[in-house]
Amino acid sequence: MSVEQFGYKQELHRALTLKDLLIYGMIFMVPIAPFGVFGYVWDGAQGMVALAYLIGMVAMFFTAMSYWSMSRAFPVSGSVYAYAQRGIHPTVGFFAGWLILLDYILVPSLLYIVSAAALSPILPGVPAWVWIVGFIAVNSVINLLGISFTAKANKYILVAEIIVLAVFVVLGLIALYAGQGAGHLTLNPLYNADHFSLPLVMGAVSIAVLSFLGFDGISTLSEETKGGVDTVGKASLGALMLVGVLFILQTWIAADLAQGMNFSSLDTAFYDTANLAGGAWLKQLTIWSTALSWGIANALVAQAAVSRILFAMARDKQLPKLLAKVHPRFKTPYVSTLIVAVISIASGLYFNGNIDNLSRLVNFGALMGFLLLHISVINHYMLRNKSRNLLLHLIFPLIGFFIIGFVIYEMDSQAKILGLSWLAIGVVYYLVMRFTLKRDVVLDLDN
């Protein structure tokens, strides 16, 4: 399929292969992502960190399958926005895009804040805003130079992250069996009968799931991908499963090392366990790795993803058309990229020091968007096209819908209030756009 079939012009450069997309998704999720939020998940799950990540991976598996189904039907940029727009109705698509924007617009800010928090113990004299602005400037320049340049940078960053993770895993296991922490691998990080409570664990999942956000970002690059219609789906599922296994492995080891420890700060909990595993040099290595992987690698692809969503919505006149401008030389949505940079600076400075609430707010937007994604699969395939594939087009989406719905239900009330407030702003904006500015999009839903 080509974008021309859906009424669009091919403006973005098709340069990405399945391998590029796999790397992109893994970089977006960050193989060492638990380094930055381990303390919050540990606290919320009462030590059952590996269980929280396992549940998160299962929930995201069904979501990845729904992404695969919709990316086959509609291989265009826009992710959940495009899928709900064409799979259900343009109005639903707008609100799906609005909700996912809460995720994508705030994710870069969260990444910069985590990076600044990681570097604070090493360089306490450097204000957090300096790191935030510096990371944003570097990422904006790289993204403006083109998607091919971004893909090349990702490969080197991913290799470095895997090496750091391997070092922690090896030294962590050696330390465990030398008597540190629990003294050996136990089942407690996966299940502890003395502390287990499903609502409690699901509350922790609402933070842990942040680490998985990124495989969905692969779908925003549909118009820059070469290969068949299954390329995006294969990359989404492959990246999710690979990184999910790494998340469970590292948090299992870290949770057993952390048994009996009292953390002075949840922000630095993982680095304290790294210090127990390998000493001060490993602690420093994990701190710098977190800062660079979150602040450069992850934020780089996050900024690329949200700029494509803004581009897709502006192209459909759902946002100001200026955001759909493509650079004549680099073939990138440069106005959207610069707008994301400005928003990241503002929100990064505003939420600095408030990682847990910001992460829940980001997750609220993503998870609500995923709910609409699952509905899109059922509506498009089962109700509209009478699909006979009950497993992929009905059972999987329903399971994914109910798991994610329960995670949202158990989410912190403040995050739900802020998230619903964002949705209310979207309702007002939509009404103004639809009835005052007289903007609407008519789509041929039979395509």
Image (tube, helix red, strand yellow):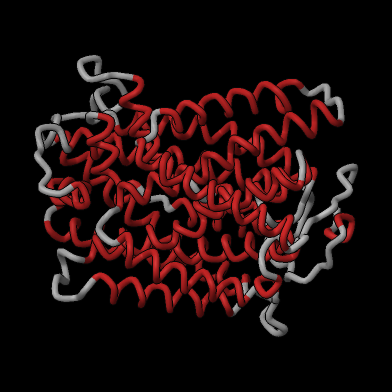
Total marks placed = 0
- Residue 377: image location, x then y, percent: 72, 34
Q: Is residue 225 visible?
A: no
- Residue 61 location, quadrant: top right
Nearer to the camera, 386 or 231: 386
- Left or right of 213: which side holds 170? left
397 is higher (above) or lower (below) than 158:
above
Q: Which residue lies furthest to the top in this view?
A: 193
Nearer to the camera, 236 or 45: 45
Nearer to the camera, 197 or 278: 197
**Residue drawn at (72%, 83%), measured in percent from left and top?**
328
- Residue 327: image location, x then y, percent: 68, 81
- Residue 136 location, quadrant: bottom left
275 is higher (above) or lower (below) than 325:
above
**Residue drawn at (9%, 39%), measured in percent from left and top?**
262
Q: Is residue 134 visible?
A: yes
- Left or right of 329: which side holds 255? left
**Residue drawn at (41%, 67%), measured in percent from left and top?**
296
- Residue 338: image location, x then y, percent: 54, 76
**Residue drawn at (47%, 47%), measured in percent from left and top?**
421
- Residue 56: image location, x then y, percent: 45, 34
- Left or right of 202: which side holds 385? right
- Left or right of 145: which side holds 93? right
Q: Residue furthest front?
A: 436
Q: Which residue lies furthest to the bottom in this view?
A: 329
16 is higher (above) or lower (below) than 177:
below
